[in-house]
Amino acid sequence: MRTFRLDLGPRSYPIHIGRGLIDRADLIAPQPAGRVAVVTNEKVAPFYLDRVLRGLAHLAPVPVVLPDGERHKTLAGLDPIFTTLLRERCDRDTMLVALGGGVVGDMTGFAAACYQRGVPFVQIPTTLLAQVDSSVGGKTGVNHPLGKNMIGAFHQPCSVVIDTATLGTLPDKELSAGLAEVIKYGLIRDAAFFDWLEDNVDRLLARDDEALAETIERSCRHKALVVAEDERETGARALLNLGHTFGHAIETGVGYGGWLHGEAVAAGMMMAADLSHRIGWISERDVSRIAGLLRRARLPVAPPPIDPERFLELMAVDKKVRHGRMRLVLLKAIGQAVITDDVPPDALRQTLTQVIS
């Protein structure tokens, strides 16, 4: 097992990575808790819910099984969690356990932030995307028809327990979606990691245990360092959103669930790379390398056919917009990202016009 801590002072917590950790009640609930509610969805439950409930049997755990899919990540979608907690008379000593992918983690974390004004929760991410990104850092929330993740709260988990064996039941398409967030770390802050991914992407697609563990740990360490520096995204943490302003526009434009989040981020990173090249920051060779790695990871490199003017409207509904100015994360080089609100409008329109298929 690999373990390290995300350093946030009194809100610090461990991140555990290894095989079989889903059965480790001592990691999931290391502190005494009044009650435990395990939140999962109908896709994950048949594989892992009974195992987690058995491990936590001494805490009389309460299961909550949500419908699967991004389209259920709404305020109304939280109601089964709150209803169960109230029906079971769960108090402020209750701990929530998020067992699933990014949607389950985001919803459970937001419910934990809201229930009786805040209860603890633990992340057990079962998808690669959740393991390398969304389970770490305390961003929680739900979508709105007008914008993705626009309703939420910062609420850090007590711990993150990553069982790499759960990737054995992950569909190939979702494994690739998780690789988009992995590639992001190489692009924004670690050129050597990007090189390593070029050499090892086939091992990752083949679910090589050693390669996956290495990838998850390196990704989580990057995320932990950035979050420790800027927990509430007032500065450097926004760099983690490379491709996300474009990607969120794609997800909203096609309807939540039409594209997987990682697929949208991959196309969004490609658009960010194209724009970075248009304003003279990265070379054509860099753009080709990025496209090549995304393709090898079986990810899209072009967005769906959304009208460019509509795309701009969707991009304007973004948490990085400040004082009416759109801020984008772009690349100065592979391994060096920057946040800018000074992109020439003509260059952005050219990217939207030329890249959208």
Image (spheres, rainbow, N blue to C red):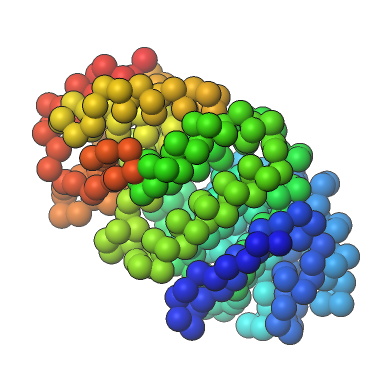
Let me know if residue 54 appears in the view.
Answer: yes
Report the number of discs.
0
Q: Position of residue 10 (x, y in %)?
A: 48, 83
| Quadrant in the picture for the C terminus | top left
Report whether 202 appears left or right of 21. left
Between 43 and 230, the one lying in front of the other is 230
Q: Is residue 239 above or below residue 255?
A: below
Q: Position of residue 109 (x, y in %)?
A: 56, 64
Residue drawn at 74 percent across, 47 percent down: 166
Residue drawn at 63 percent across, 66 percent down: 3
Q: Is residue 188 above or below residue 300?
A: below
Q: Position of residue 262 (x, y in %)?
A: 50, 37
Residue drawn at 85 percent across, 58 percent down: 51
Q: Is residue 40 above or below residue 170?
A: below
Let me know if residue 80 appears in the view.
Answer: no
Residue drawn at 46 percent across, 43 percent down: 193
Q: Position of residue 57 (x, y in %)?
A: 87, 72
Report whether 254 appears left or right of 334. right
| Quadrant in the picture for the N terminus | bottom right
